[in-house]
Image: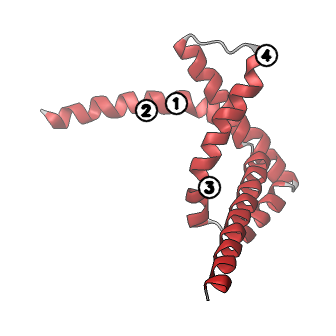
Amino acid sequence: MKKVLLPLILLFSLNSINSQENYKSLLIEYMTAQGQFETFNATIDQMGTMMGVTIKDENREEFTNDVMGSLIELLVPVYQKHFTVEDLKDAIQMYKTPIGKKISEKTPIIAQETMQASMQWGMELSQKMQKYLE
């Protein structure tokens, strides 16, 4: 029984790991098609500017791979709760259409522009909420 059970457990574990890696690859493809990495890069650049940090060109690729890799690890379980493999494949196909490409192209620009508006709105919201604390 042990001789049969151990290989089955190993096979299941390897299949699960392989499935996780396939989902991660698909998620990366989806996020690339959606333009999310450009948005994340713009956010990183903006944070660097705010903090006075400049990442040298020779370190940029290593830094980006590191932070994006850790982000993907955090996002895989979140996306898996909400999207199946087929959902991601369908979304990737949508982003290959003309409107999908336009959405992907404009998303980083819109995100950057809305970040400023969101900060302003947050300040206004904070001021309005102060009235209710008194």
The answer to whether mark 3 and mark 1 are in CB contact below 8 A is no
Secondary structure of residue under mark 3: helix
Residue extending farthest to the left is 134
Q: Nearer the viewer, mark 3 or mark 1?
A: 3
The answer to whether mark 3 and mark 2 are in CB contact below 8 A is no
The tag earlier along the polypeptide, 4 or 2, is 4
Q: Position of 110 compared to 129: left or right?
A: right
- State the residue position of label 2: 121
Disc 2 to disc 1, how far (Cα)?
A: 6 Å
Q: How busy is the neighbourhood of tag 4: few (under 14 within 10 Å), some, or many (20 plus)?
A: few
Q: Amino acid at mark 4?
A: Glu
The answer to whether mark 2 and mark 1 are in CB contact below 8 A is yes
Q: Quadrant of residue 27?
A: bottom right
Viewport quadrant of the N terminus: bottom right
Q: Nearer the viewer, mark 1 or mark 4?
A: 4
Q: Nearer the viewer, residue 113 or 81?
A: 81
Residue 37 locus on image (x, y percent): 71, 39
Residue 102 locus on image (x, y percent): 81, 45
- State the residue position of label 3: 76
Secondary structure of residue under mark 1: helix
Residue 5 locus on image (x, y percent): 63, 83
Disc 3 to disc 2, how far (Cα)?
A: 31 Å
